[in-house]
Structures are given as C-alpha cells and as structure tokens.
Image (cartoon, rainbow, N blue to C red):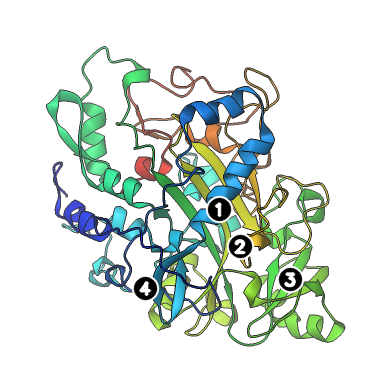
Amino acid sequence: MRNIGLIAASAMLLLAVGACDGSKKAATGGKEGATLETAGAVTPVPLPDSPSFPVPAATINGWIANSDTAAIRAHAWSLWQAMTAPSGQSVNNQQLPIWDTWADTSVVFPQPQATNASLTAEQAKPSPGRKFFKPAQFHHTRDARLKALATAAADNFPLAVDSKYDPPAATFIGGPQAGPGGGTYSYASGASLTKLNAAWPTGTTPQNRAINEFPIRAIETKPVFGLVKANGLTAQPLWQGPSASTNAGNPTPDTWTTCVLIQPGATGAVRPATSAEINAGAVSVQAQGLACKTFLWAPLSTFYAAQLNAAEAQNFNAATGVSGPAAAAAGDYSVLLAMHVNTKEIPFWTWQTYWWQPGADTPNNFPGSKQGQPGALGGPWNNYASCTAYDQTTTPGGSTMQVCFNPYLETSPGIPAGVTSNCVSCHGVALVGPNPNYPANYNKPIVFFTDPTYFNTQSTHTDFSWAVASAP
C-alpha cells in the first residue's frame, strides 16, 4: 500500500498540475471531434481571477441570507461560462474548454499498485486518453439492497463519468496534509485516511473530526458522458420531468418518453423528427432499451463531444458494461450529458448542477432551467440547464427544503429520495469510517456536523467531498 507521507503518486500529481500558466490565448470554442490524449499533452488551466470567481464568502452568504435566487443563479451561470471558455490548450486541432484540462480521477486518485490482486497488470498500467468510470455515487451506499438497485438501473442506461479537479483542488488532495497525532496524511489514499480516522485523540468531538478544509479556489466537478455513434442516428433520452417517464418515482433516463435523435456532421436547430428519421433511429432505441414515444432531431453540435480512439472506446465499454450494437467503437463520440460543479468559495461550498437540455426547458422548470443564461454563452454550452443549492432550505432557517438534483444521476433507485434531494445535504454526510449512508430523505435540514444520526466519534467528515471519502 502507499505511504502516508508524500507518496510517489502525489509527486506525479504535483508535476501534472503545477505547471498551470493560466494561458488566455485566443481560440474558438469546442466543436465536434475533441479527443483528450495523455495528461502530459495538456497543461491544467486554473479558472482565471475575475469579479465572478472567487466571490468573497461574505457576498455569497449575503445572497443566501437574503434568499437572492437571481444572484445565486447568476453566479452559477458565470462559473459555467468561465469553465467552458477556451483554455488555450488544443488536442488534435481541437480547443479544449478550461474544465477539460483539469486533472481527472485517475491522476488525483491513482489506484494502489502494490500487491493488489484485484488489479490485473493491464488495469494497473496508466493508459492515454480520456478515462471513464462508473458513477461512484451509485456505490457509496453501504445498503446492499440499494446498491443492487443502483447497479441494475445503471445497466439499463449506462453512464460514464470522468471527474475533474481544478489545480488548487488536485494539489490539495494529492499533497501531504497534517493531521492528528502529528502525522502526515494523503487524502488521495483510502489507507491513509483510515489511519487518520483512527488517530484522533480520545474525546475529539464529531465536529472536530474532519480533514483540513479545501482552499477557497478549489473546484470539484463530475462530468457525465453518454455515447453517440459515428454513423446513423443515435437516440438520447431528453429530460422532460417525472411526468414524462414510465416511472415517476425513479425516472431514470431509460424511462424517459421523449428522445432526441442525434446526427453527427449535420447542422440545424432542434426540431421534431420526421417519420423517416424515427424509423432510422429505431435501431438505436431498441439497442439501448429506451422508452421513447416522442422524438426530436438534433445535430451532434448540440453537445460537447469528443471522438474516441480504440483504447478510449474499450475503456468506455469496460466502465459501462455495454456490449453488442450499443457498444462504443473507435470514431464514436462521448458526449457530455451532465456535470455537477461545486466550489469552496464558502465554507459549505457552492453547489450547481447542469444537464443537457437543448431547445425549450422542461414544462415546469423542474428541477431547474436555462433561465438567466448569459447572452454571450454560445453553443454547445447554452444547451445545458442548471439548478443551484447553496443552502439546504429555500429560506435561511426555514422548513421548505431546497430541491436540486441531476436527472441523469439522482433519479437512480439506489439513491434514496433522489428527486427531492439537494447537493449540500447529500455531500455533507461524506465520511471516512462507519456512516449511515446517504440521507434517507430530505424532509428537514441536517445539522452539520453534530447531528448524531450522521456524525459520531468513529468517523471523519471530509469537507463535503465524496471523492475524498471514496479514495481507493
């Protein structure tokens, strides 16, 4: 296993993220065909300083205290606009947005290499290109029944993630951290975190059993990817709310009754699909087991898309478990379906999530919308809707809970009460050590970090980071 101190993986990470130059070279935005190669080919670019980031904590907390939803949403959109701006980094003649230059899970949380029988020699090798993983949130729960439900739902509509960490977050996680007993710990190592959790002096309160806080410029993201085939029409389900699903209680993507037929190389606006297009897209619908009843048509350019090489396609299939006609092949596209984004600008972080929503918003703007988007936000980024949860309740100290979830993720039956959830309540119970899983419901706020339902003297809370809590 890895050492507790400054391990080789941390040194590699610091090399990967330490060369950030904040380049602001003029370039065009994302287009079809982006391919991310090895980490060494891309210099991570931090989000540039601006009036929109980092915003002083007093300002953001003032928005929360005044229930200033408009200011909070404006901040979420300003983050999206800044993260999706051209980075000055190009791969295969393709400009990458800033967020896609950041270190991914495979760099920040390298798998243990020593005597791990669960890793084959091939799996242990670093591989070039974009990495894909199953969404970890489907497996955080320690409830075997919920985990089985989440796995089954993921198999019905496979999703892949490749979490990204901006340079301040990546350096913080990968570097040595002081902790209890005068020890030095790595937040990238599950073994090191277990030792940290056991090192607290007797009498340490649950509130004080915590990792060090992330720096205020830290950003964690969770991009979620689907697949569009290089040829023909690929159906992608389109979120239109729980009522447009065959399962309103757990409206996972495979149950959505509206689908969009995606065509690479085409141009034009989102529109109703023709009968010929629907017939041609039926193969994709059948291969994916979707519940489509209403069809739209859209060009691939409505997504942020990256063309896959053979190794990346194989990695996508391994992560999602897809085989047969729906499996990825070289030349196909990974497409950005959704992204969670949280920033450490305030102690309890800011929380915003985005999902693919070309054309009009959902009929009831649930759980969010494209309202308030900056006029200068161009495609494909203006095809994503958002919601925010900067506090657990809609008014400070109130009883009405904030609802903000990502339709591609939290609708899973393995995530209790996902369609009434909010980001801050869920992430606030991220712990190392024995813990009671996700909140069973979101009926009332959680008292951080003293609520005995969640916090105890056997666990260490991880500053709202499920990524750290799940370190390998």
Judged from this view, the residue extending furthest toward the right is 275
Are the residues flagged by discs 4 and 1 in contact, CB closer than 8 Å?
no
Q: Is residue 336 left or right of residue 232?
A: left
Residue 111, given in percent of the width and then of the height, sits at 27, 56
Total label count? 4
Under mark 3, the amino acid is Val
Closer mark to the observer between disc 4 and disc 1: 1
Q: Residues within 10 Å of mark 1 (few under 14, many from 20)?
A: many
To which quarter of the image does residue 46 belong? Answer: bottom left
Give whichever of 180, 35 is nearer the camera: 35
Q: Residues within 10 Å of mark 2 (few under 14, many from 20)?
A: many
Q: Earlier in the sequence, mark 3 or mark 4?
A: 4
Residue 129's disc is 4
Q: Earlier in the sequence, mark 4 or mark 1?
A: 1
Under mark 4, the amino acid is Gly
Report which residue position mark 3 lands on: 260
Give whichever of 318, 105 is nearer the camera: 105
Under mark 1, the amino acid is Trp
Distance from the alpha carbon under mark 2 to that under mark 4: 23 Å
Residue 80's disc is 1
